[in-house]
Amino acid sequence: MRFQRTVLSGLTAELPPEVWSSADLESRLQPLYSRLRLPEGRLELMTGIRERRFWPSAVRPSAASAAAGRKAMEAAGVGPKDVDLLIHASVCRDRLEPSTAAYVHGLLGLGPQAQILDVSNACLGWLNAVVLAAGLVESGQIRRALVCAGEDGRPLVERTVRLLNEDLSLTRDTIKPYFANLTIGAGGAAAVVCRDDLAVRGSVRLVGGAAETDSSANGLCEGDTASDELDMRTDSEALLAAGVALAGRCWGRFRAATGWDASTPSKVVTHQVGRRHSTLLFESLGLDPAKDCRSFDTLGNVGSASLPATFALARADGRIRAGERVALLGIGSGLASLMLAVEC
């Protein structure tokens, strides 16, 4: 895929107020740790995640998505009547029906001209939504789309802590499918996807990209509702191996589509899983680890918001500067990968 006229304007991250350190989380798991004689500090040691953030319990995904969207609109100089398409692109949704975008639309006070829809593809949803919106921009069907994500991992983490503490049949081996749940955080991200002549100064230009899917791995990480609560189980080792292999194949497509190679981007932003995933991914693709922009150490895995929030934060704190080329390497359970080349 290639893009000629599309940019990301007003890219922003929205961070929740509550900070839970890995040490705090382990203290909540003290009954499990004591029973199985697990060493304290293993969570941060194994993942590199020092802390993650959560919204207060009453905050819905739509509210987080709208908060990020409002900031993006302000930064992009866009008003409610300027948005032709709103996409809520998160794992988390308020409910099955109506679309969470319907609530985001109301919270933002968008006009009746704005189409609304949800795009969900595990942790890849935000990038998928950007590509869909960019296609409509390039074809002239719309002028501007607002792509938002609002993720809330708190219910999943709280249920996991309760289950691990209360199920006395669990062993060191049988707790493994729940371990990935403890890396999850919360947060939001948004950007206005629009034609370059409608964008404010400092917008990010989309250059091109590629996608790759491996549905044979669709059972390695599965989440659902259980008794009105979230439940997720992950074969972390198999998912890591399949994910890195998929990324390698997608990287080949990306290089062919964009003409970029490992030396081209000044910086690289990936979906944020943990230290081991980042290390193996960079080794597999032959990328320089010094180019890696990370946030997992302080945010954990924030689902679809992870990559755009990390990108926004890196631009805000100067790790990514104007004029730099950046590779956005996304991946989500399923498995699916989407990689985009952008110029800041």
Image (spheres, rainbow, N blue to C red):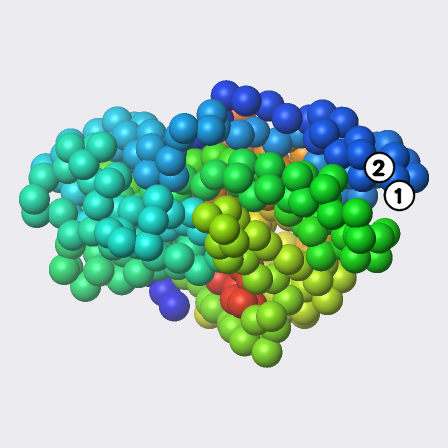
Q: Against 336, is 97 above or below?
A: above
Q: Against 103, is 235 above or below?
A: below
Res. 102 image quadrant: top left
What secondary structure is found at the residue carrying circle 2? helix
Q: Amino acid at mark 2?
A: Tyr
Q: Position of residue 138 (x, y in %)?
A: 23, 60
Q: Where the N terminus falls, by quadrant?
A: bottom left
The residue depicted at 59 percent of the width and 54 percent of the height is 232
Q: Position of residue 172 (x, y in %)?
A: 85, 52
Res. 94 image quadrant: top left
* Position of residue 24 in the picture relative to residue 209 (left or right): right
What secondary structure is found at the residue carrying circle 1? helix
Residue that label 2 marks: 33
Front-most of residues 146 and 204: 146
The residue depicted at 44 percent of the width and 60 percent of the height is 121
Q: Amino acid at mark 1?
A: Leu
> Residue lying farthest left?
112
Count of numbered labels shown in the rendering: 2
| Residue 226: mark | none
Residue that label 1 marks: 36
Front-most of residues 110 and 204: 110
* Position of residue 195 in the picture relative to residue 160 (left or right): left
* Position of residue 310 in the picture relative to residue 90 (left or right): right
Q: Mark 1–mark 2 contact, CB under 8 Å?
A: yes
Crowding at label 1, few (<14), some or many (≥20) Cα neighbours within 10 Å?
few
The residue depicted at 48 percent of the width and 35 percent of the height is 187
Crowding at label 2, few (<14), some or many (≥20) Cα neighbours within 10 Å?
some
Q: Where the C terminus falls, by quadrant?
A: top left
* Position of residue 115 in the picture relative to residue 127 (left or right): left
Q: Position of residue 2 (x, y in %)?
A: 36, 65
